[in-house]
Image (cartoon, rainbow, N blue to C red):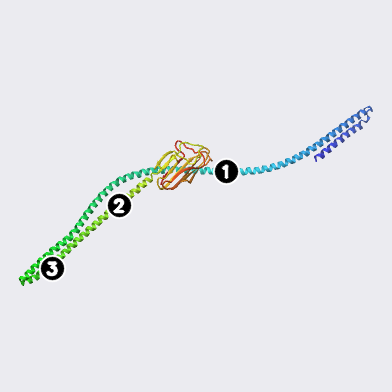
Amino acid sequence: MMSYIILGFLCVIPSICLSILTDGETQNGTLRDESVDTETDVFRQLLNQETLIRMSLVKNVHSLMKDMIEMKESMSASNKRLHDAEKEISSLKNEVQLLKTENQKFKEQAVKFQDEFRTTDSMFNEIEGNFTKVSQSQTQYERHVNDKIEDFEKNTSTILNDIKIEVRYLSVTLLDLNKHTMELNMSIPELIESRITDFTANVNRSVGDINHKLLTSKDYQEQLVYNLSTLGNEQSSLMKIISDNLNNTINSIKADVEQSQKSQLKLSAAVSSLEVFRMNMSLLNNCVSKTSVSFTVGLTSSSSSWNGNILVFPHVVTNNGNGYNPSTGKFTAPTDGTYVFFVTVNTYGSNYIYLDIVLNGLQKVRTMSHNSANYMTGTNMAVLQLYTGNSVWVSRSSGQSYYTDSVPITTFSGFLL
């Protein structure tokens, strides 16, 4: 459309110029003849100039048309590129919006993680404080138990001495009773035999006298009958007396035997009590020896590049029972029982580290010192059933470094329940 407008404009200009020149020529027809040639030359020059101008304009118009076509093509390409750029900008805006949404989610998660880490740190600080209180209470309890054991041992020594004296007295009494019983057992047959012998001798003498008197007098026979009846009565009364005495003696012996059996039962009960007391003392000594197994160790120098296997704690705070070896970093159970272990680690700067509590090569629990902030704390606790000779240590799972001070921050503790 623009090209047609320009061509029309170029065609109008020469016609206007020609009309002007013609009008001038008509108006100036009354001039002198000598000026006609000059005007003709001028008109020719003007026509030549007009031709040149027209050719120049045509050339410029063609050049402009060519430039406009090129501009149209470039504008079309630019529009296409602009459309593609708009599409890319739209997709980039969508991606930016998604990134903003994800960034907001990450920020929210980071805030949640920070809150959880703060909560976890406060919980572990509280647990560590409780652990310290438990250690102090355990120490006080051990002292109290030791004091009670000392008092109990003193009282036990006195009681044992009294029991020994009473047992000796009962033993002597039992021996005397056994001796008296043996004497009674030996004297009863002799007494019965002697009384029977005396009675037999008396009867024999009486029978001899009766026979002699029968030979001398018949009157004496009646007296003899009377004497025999009297003798029979005396014999029955004597047998009754002997039987009563024998029964009384047997009853007395039975009572003495029952008394000796009761004394023997008392002695057996006393011996059983002493045996039970000895067993209780043995169990008490075992319990006292068990409660004395505990340790707390730590590190006093930091490392930003440590990435070994076993974390060795060379600084020993407490090592009751000598179960922990500061050279190897391992705790070896001196006795069977249930043990409690606690580990705390601070990472160095912006590093991270995960540590495991290991029992005989098996990971049991893990601490996490994350790198979402500097000098993060990781801590954990484990209750493990150990047998004599089992080993427990702290091992690195991943990450590197640890942070501590002259008073240990990174520590490892344990004790026997």
Q: Report which residue position mark 1 lands on.
A: 106
Q: Position of residue 323 (x, y in %)?
A: 41, 43
Q: First in sequence: mark 1 or mark 3?
A: 1
Residue to which mark 3 is pinned: 233
Secondary element under disc 1, as helix, strand or loop, is: helix
Q: Is residue 153 left or right of residue 343?
A: left
Which label is found at residue 416? none
Please identify the quarter of the rendering in which residue 263 is found: bottom left
The one nearer the camera, 190 or 340, is: 190
Element class at badge 3: helix
Q: CA distance from mark 2 to mark 1?
A: 73 Å
Asked if the residue at tag 3 contacts the one at tag 1, i.e. Cβ–Cβ closer than 8 Å, the answer is no
- Percent of width and height locating residue 249: 19, 60
Please give the label number shown on residue 273: 2
Label 2 vs label 1, nearer the camera: 2
Residue at 6%, 71% (x, y): give it.
Answer: 215
Number of other residues with Cα within 10 Å of mark 1, as a class: few under 14, some 14 to 19, many 20 or more = few
Callout 3 amino acid? Asn
Q: Residue at x 21, y 55 (%)?
A: 179
Query: What residue sits 61% from the left and 43% below the top?
Result: 99
